[in-house]
Amino acid sequence: MATSKHIAPTTTLTPLIAGILLASGLAVGAEGSSEHQTIASAVKGGSAKLHFRLRHEEVDVDNLSEDEARALTLRTRLNYSTGRYQGLGVSVEMDNITEIDGDNYPTSPALKNSGNFPGRAIIADPEGTEVNQAYISYKQGKTEARYGRQRINLDNQRFVGGVGFRQNEQTYDAFSIAHEITAADTNIYYAHVNNVNRIFGEDDPALSDTDSSTEILNINYSGLEAGDFIFYSYLLDQKLSDTQLDTYGLRFSGKSNGLGYQAEYATQERELPNGNEADADYIFLEGSVDLAGATFALGFENLQSDEGDFGFSTPLATGHKFQGWTDQFLLTPNEGIQDIYLSVGAKFDDIKLLAVYHDFQSDKDNLSGDDDLGSEIGFLASKKIGEYKLSLKYANYDAGDDSFNKSDTEKLWLTVSGAF
């Protein structure tokens, strides 16, 4: 059943956006960011694009009920941006997700646990029509402010991202401002987030929109020849659970002469409604080398635990990018997690290939004295043909100690995407 998301901070903007779209007839002209002399010119000179992404997904879980699911879904995305008039512009983006064929599957853990889907695995692509983005922006020189529903992807998206792999993207109802200090080689990004529109859709009983009061600050200094140095502060106030999650971190990344390197450290404090507090740290190290036409990378990621009671958490992350593609650890176990991974990427005849292996252990032993969280291997092949992109992706997770209640899992994706 199609749904339409409520846009918390932009309700009064909806009639204006609708009027602009009707007046313009979705005219396609100059770049949406160009400056125009009149409002009519800005509207007529806007740009519209149509995107689609067709995906077949298979999931098999080796648990007691032998959960499995198959789905063929189509995401159709239409976006439109006006040109700028005196620095002002309007952007709107609509998504429709349609299940063309497949099983009757749950789209979230909440639906799976309701008992309505025995023997069915989760495929997190709910059907529906939603407003993905709708915001007014103002740009003056090196500064741009946005108000409304918008996409926010910061750094490698480990802490703030859009989960773009899923058909229903995660976006944010927010006020944001981005400013570039050219003379100081510094970019500053700040956002106040009122609501997080999650991938599970508006109608999910437990994991739909997340009402919040979140402060995001990201400062990127690129004046070093060796790479970028980043400071960030992410202060999450999740209103539904009345939980405060404050994270402060430093990140450094760069590449030189075929050698790549990343290092990151963050510290986090969680405060529950009853006043109980917990602390945990985050460590990330990765090195890569270009050799014989391939790129080899070795990395270590550690989401630490506070004595087995709380694991370092990244609730706004693009979690699918990290700790394996079967999504076993979207929520960090209380015991924390250590991930040692090795990847090899190459390109042959315009076909991009990637293989990744992960070995997982808990940061602290669980109550059974166990620490083996399993391992995963993944493969990806993709090729661009004209305006279309084709990809084949496969991941196989091998569970570790039984006390962690994980199951062997296989996932396969076949995807075709394009834009007009």
Image (spheres, helix red, strand yellow):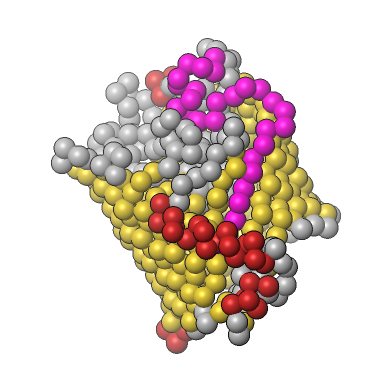
Residue reaching furthest left? 275
Q: Nearer the viewer, residue 338 or 2?
A: 2
Residue 285: give x, y in percent of width and height.
Answer: 45, 54
- Quadrant where the N terminus sits is top right
Task: Check residue 35 for magenta coloring.
Answer: no
Can residue 320 be seen from the camera position used here?
Answer: no
Q: Nearer the viewer, residue 92 or 252?
A: 92
Name the side, left or right, on which 163 lies relative to 366. right
Residue reaching furthest bottom? 183
Residue at point 69% right, 63% down?
26
Name the side, left or right, on which 281 lies relative to 405. left
Residue at point 49% right, 23% down?
112
Residue 130: give x, y in percent of width and height.
Answer: 56, 45
- Quadrant where the C terminus sits is bottom right
Residue at point 57% right, 59% down?
18
Residue 166 found in image quarter: top right
Residue 309 found in image quarter: top left
Task: Check residue 116 for magenta coloring.
Answer: yes
Magenta span of residues? 91-118
Residue at point 46% right, 47% down?
6
